[in-house]
Every structure is written in C-alpha cells, then in structure tokens.
Image (tube, grey):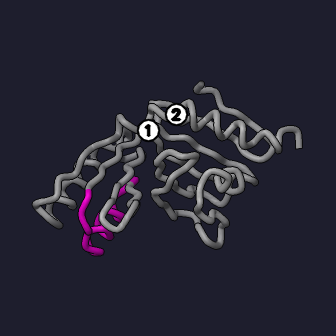
Amino acid sequence: MRESTEVSAAAIRELPPSAKVRVLTWNREFPPEAAAALRSLPGAIVVRIAPCDWCVVCEATDEDPDGDECLRAGCQVVAAADPSVRAIDISHALCAIEVAGPRAHELLEKGCGVDLDLAAFPVGDSTGTRFAGVAAILLRTSDDAFRSYVARSHRDYVISWLNDAAAEWRGA
C-alpha cells in the first residue's frame, strides 16, 4: 500500500523507508532551555505530546542524511537536562504518512479533535493526538501539507481510513 492516493482535495502517501526519520521519546517535564536546544538541531522537530510526554522527530537533512547525528545530539541534550531521564529511540515503531492538498486540513480534522486551520495550527506546529482512534504525532509542514507518524501496525488502517474519508472529494 505504498502507492500514493490522489484526490482533488488531498494527496495521501506513506513516505518510503528511504526517507529517514528518527524519533526519540521520553516521559518527564522538560526545561524550556533544553527544548530550545533541541529545536536548534538541524532537522529536529520537538513535539510536546502531553505535559510530561515529549518526542523529537529528527528528519534527514543534507548534512545528516539518515538523522543519526540529530538523534545522538538529542540524546545528549536530554541527558544533560536531566541525567535521570532515559530517552528511547522509537524510530522503527513508526511510519510517516503525508497528506497534502487544498483540503488536507479538512480531511485530517475528520479524524481528530484538533483545529487544523492555518490560523490555529500554523506551519511548524505539531501535537500528539488521537487520529482515527489511534495515537499519532501530527506536524504541519506547509500551508497545505501535514505529516503524521503512527505505529507501523496501524499503517494500513490509517491509510485506508484517509482514503475512505476523502471519498466525498473524488472527482470534485
């Protein structure tokens, strides 16, 4: 099910495994200065999933094509902020699904309780949420594009759910 699905409202596709993403997670309140240090890492997106639940998504960059340097630096920042915190690499547990197009936010809003209008959820914003009944990390990557990270075991279900939810816009 790696093929992309195009409807006039949105394109839905799973990013290929070659699009390297590393995800680091930990459970503990985190100092703002440490979060700022993580945000300064090339390719790093810091997501506060809940008050004491954080993750850093390390996307590939030209300087760090597999995200490993970002992941290592992220571990160092987390350890320096609080040596008792243990960060865990959950990269292989997740897959990335991209939804892009003029109605991408409307499509995604059908599956979650987050207001994804550009004014309420600007480019660069991210959150942890329930999407179509499963845990997801949702990022806004441009005015009309989002990336969602879900458990690999839910991949087929989420892509199928998105395709079904977009049915009303097919041919429009």
- C-alpha distance separating marks 1 and 2: 7 Å
Identify the disc placed on residue 1: none
- Labels 1 & 2 near each other (Cβ < 8 A): yes
Can you identify the residue that label 1 sits on? Answer: 151
The residue type indicated by label 1 comes to Ala
Query: Does residue 56 lie above or below 150 as drawn?
Result: below
In the image as oriented, which residue stretches furthest toward the front? 133
Q: Quadrant of residue 28?
A: bottom left
Label 2 packing within 10 angstroms: few (<14), some (14-19), many (20+): some
In the image as oriented, which residue stretches furthest toward the right? 172
Residue 133 location in percent, x, y? Answer: 54, 46
Q: Is residue 133 magenta?
A: no
The residue type indicated by label 2 comes to Arg
Q: Quadrant of residue 91?
A: top left
Identify the disc placed on residue 155: 2
- Nearer to us in this view, 66 or 51: 51
Residue 27 location in percent, x, y? Answer: 26, 58
Residue 46 location in percent, x, y? Answer: 38, 60
